[in-house]
Each structure stands twice: as structure tokens, then as C-alpha cells.
Amino acid sequence: MQLSPSSIAASVAESVQYQGRKASRQGSEQRRQDILDAAMRIVVRDGVRAVRHRAVAAEAGVPLSATTYYFKDIDDLLTDTFAQYVERSAAFMGKLWVCNEGLLREMVAYGGGSAQSRSPLADEIAQMTADYVQRQLLNRREYLMAEQAFRQEALLNPRLADLVHSHQQILLQGTCQFFQVLGSREPQQDAKVLTAIIGRMEYQGLLGGVEPLTAEEMLEILKRYMHLVLASV
């Protein structure tokens, strides 16, 4: 039985394993949560290497002993901070797939699968994808910054590498089913290419610089790709 994208996201969320000490009471769980949120803010603002027990305690407004109680070392603290990010991302993407999957099926059914319907369908899907990237950059910029920081750190930390892989699976597997709905002959390959394009666009959007990728350029790139994919369906 084919799992839906939202089920895949939920499965990823359930698979997340935390390394630090578990909270025994509701109040202590809130303190643990405050520590993880503070660590994430430091990652976004100052980078992964700035995460230290003393800095996190000051950011969270808790005693230094609280951070060392829940997390015996920085590795545990970083791992759980990113684990929380993956869990939250899975919940966000699960809701997104629920909202978009029905719409996508309606769009495909409306055209009847004819060759004539593929060109406007490619344009619509490209616009949906461009809008998604723009919303990510506008509304979830800090999350994207943290994701980039953890991906870089994962090159040196195998525990983070496993979490990065789980996080990538959320978008990849959902996008794979997206292409299955479209009738792609190679949904897995098409999904890998599209998620790579999205990742590159997000990175360029965060980086900015002298020649940032404009919304118009982004849309044209996505249109070209979707027309190429649907032409082979």
C-alpha cells in the first residue's frame, strides 16, 4: 500500500529520537523546550559553533545547571535541537501535503490527461512551486537558515547526518508521490531533481548577494522543468 505524503511526514516525525535526559514533569518539559528553542535561536543568529552551555543558558534565561542536567554535552544538545526541527518540519509538511494533494488531483483530473492539458498544468504546478519557495523565504527564513547550518555541521557529525537524511525524506518522498499523481515514468528521479532545484533556490534566496535569483527567474526555471517532465508523460 502506497503511503500518502502526509503519512510519510508523520512517520518521520514519529521516528525522531531525542538523546538528552527526558523531562519528568510538565514544568521541567517546558524548561527543556526553552533550552532547545534558545539553542536554535543561537544557531540561526551566530551559527552552530556558538552553541555552548553557558550561552544557551543565558539565551533561555535558565541556570547553567539546567542545560547540563538535560544535555550532558554539546553534541546531545545540538542533536536534540535539530531533532526538534525535523519533528516540527515533518508536522508542517504533513499539513501542506494534505492541503495540496487534493488540489493537485483535481488539476490533473480537470485536464483529463490529454496532451493539450499538460502545458497549462505545467505552468500551474510551476507557479505553485514558486509560491512555496517564496513563502519559505518570507515566512520560514529562520528555519531555512538553521537547516543550512545543521546540514553543514552534519558533514562532521554522523548523528546529525542521520537527521538530515530523515529531513530530506519528508520533501523527497512527498514530491515523489506528487510526480506519481502526474503520471511520471520516473517519479523518484523527477522528485530528486525538483527537490534539488528547490533547495538551490532556497539557498540563493538566503544568500542574496549581487545577483540574487528573482521571482520571475525562479518561475521560468520551474516552468521549463515541469514542461520537460510533463512532455514525457
Image (cartoon, rainbow, N blue to C red):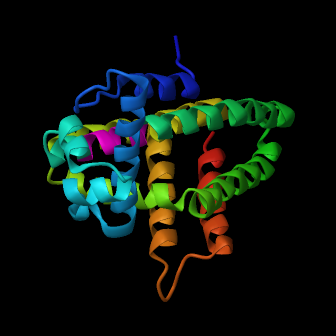
Report the quarter where the C terminus lies.
top right
Identify which residue is drawn at 65% across, 45% down: 230
Residue 65 in view in this figure: yes
Q: Is residue 193 left or right of residue 133?
A: left
Q: Nearer the viewer, residue 13 or 108?
A: 13
List x then y, in percent, for residue 126: 68, 55
The residue range painted magenta reads 78-86
Residue 184 in view in this figure: no
Q: Is residue 72 left or right of residue 18?
A: left
List x then y, in percent, for residue 155: 19, 54
Identify which residue is drawn at 37% across, 52% down: 60
Kindly indicate the quadrant of the structure image that contains residue 104.
top right
Q: What is the residue that sits farthest to the front in this orientation?
A: 63
List x then y, in percent, for residue 58: 31, 59
Q: Nearer the viewer, residue 179 or 173?
A: 173
Q: Nearer the viewer, residue 101 or 10?
A: 10
Q: Nearer the viewer, residue 17 or 123?
A: 17
Whether residue 82 is in magenta: the answer is yes
